[in-house]
């Protein structure tokens, strides 16, 4: 059993060179939760492919640093306030709904306010962002929506009622958009990774260790990766590569689907 090593506090901002083959030249992308983890990797990959990236996160310093490094624009927004979406630009050709949070507790002890918060950030905010950006995509006749779902959008685990509920809802929203947007040159898909080496997962490891009364190493081996055939955490860059592929020119017929990156979890 491989036990993940805790990463360094964070990589230095990436300075993106001009792309040799600008796959997404002239496109504009909006990535939420872009200051760290999967969102950061997606922003870097999209910028490296030639897109101008709107870096959306409530972590001001990290968002501004990343935007400067990739030639994008930082938007410091707290997405727990759905009305804050109205301050974001509506010119995105590509939307990556990635922002998320977690809370671990059994249903009978789950704080209702935390449940509601997770639905606002992970369901209502993506809906509002798409409501704001889809008209422009329709007008331009091209668009890509990639929702960072999870294996928990396809399966369930105990103690994660709010997160599992939100990811299942995001899957449904993605499919509805796929059906509505197909005639406008817009695709909508979900990427469903298993456990990714991100700050959110690092926090989950600690939370579950407390909940189950076991060590963090046991959480990784016995809880997180127990159902996975590949016994290692996924790297954020691997998820970003899948997102970039879905935004490319050869995936126009891929829509309404959920791309699993779960190390064989859902094969069980």
Image (spheres, grey):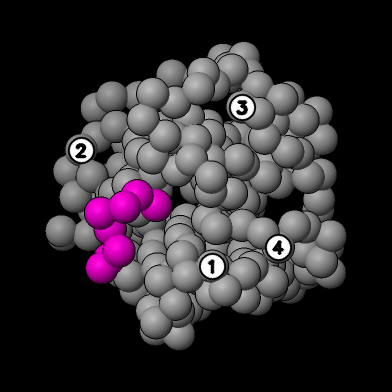
For label 1, the SS is helix
Residue at 36% of width from left, 30% of height from top?
A: 21
- Residue where numbered disc 2 is placed: 230
- Label 1, label 3: how many angstroms apart (C-alpha)? 25 Å
The residue indicated by pointer 4 is 90
Q: Closer to the observer: label 1 or label 3?
A: 1
x and y percentages locating residue 74 in the rendered image: 76, 39
Residue that badge 1 annotates: 140
Return the mark for residue 70.
3
Q: Is residue 110 visible?
A: no
Total count of labels = 4
For label 4, the crowd category at 10 Å Cα-Cα, with few meaning under 14, some 14 to 19 and many 20 or more, is some
Report the residue at 55% width, 58% height from top.
93
Left or right relative to 129: residue 151: left
Residue range corresponding to the magenta coloring: 247-254
Where residue 84 sits, quadrant-wise, is: bottom right
Q: Nearer the viewer, mark 1 or mark 4?
A: 1
**Relative to residue 106, is residue 5 depicted above or below?**
above
Q: Earlier in the sequence, mark 2 or mark 3?
A: 3
211 up-or-down from 70: above or below: below
């Amino acid at each position: 059993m491989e036990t993940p090593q805790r990463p360094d506090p964070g990589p230095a901002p990436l300075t993106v060179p001009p792309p040799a083959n600008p796959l997404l030249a002239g496109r504009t992308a909006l990535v939420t939760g872009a200051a760290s983890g999967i969102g950061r990797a997606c922003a870097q990959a999209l910028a490296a492919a030639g897109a101008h990236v709107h870096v959306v996160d409530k972590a001001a310093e990290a968002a501004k640093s990343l935007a400067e490094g990739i030639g994008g624009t930082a938007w410091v927004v707290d997405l727990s306030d759905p009305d804050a979406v109205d301050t974001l630009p509506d010119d995105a050709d590509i939307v990556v709904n990635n922002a998320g949070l977690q809370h671990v507790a059994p249903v009978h002890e789950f704080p209702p306010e935390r449940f509601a918060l997770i639905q606002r950030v992970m369901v209502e905010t993506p809906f509002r962002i798409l409501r704001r950006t889809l008209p422009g995509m329709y007008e331009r006749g091209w668009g890509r929506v990639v929702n960072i779902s999870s294996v928990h959008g396809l399966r369930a685990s105990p103690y994660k009622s709010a997160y599992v509920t939100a990811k299942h809802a995001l899957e449904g929203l993605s499919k509805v958009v796929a059906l509505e947007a197909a005639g406008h040159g817009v695709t909508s898909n979900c990427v469903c990774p298993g456990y990714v080496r991100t700050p959110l997962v690092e926090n989950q490891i600690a939370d579950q260790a407390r909940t189950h009364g076991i060590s963090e190493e046991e959480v990784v081996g016995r809880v997180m990766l127990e159902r996975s055939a590949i016994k290692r955490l996924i790297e954020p860059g691997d998820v970003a590569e899948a997102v970039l592929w879905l935004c490319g020119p050869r995936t126009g017929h891929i829509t309404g689907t959920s791309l699993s990156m779960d190390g064989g979890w859902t094969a069980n």
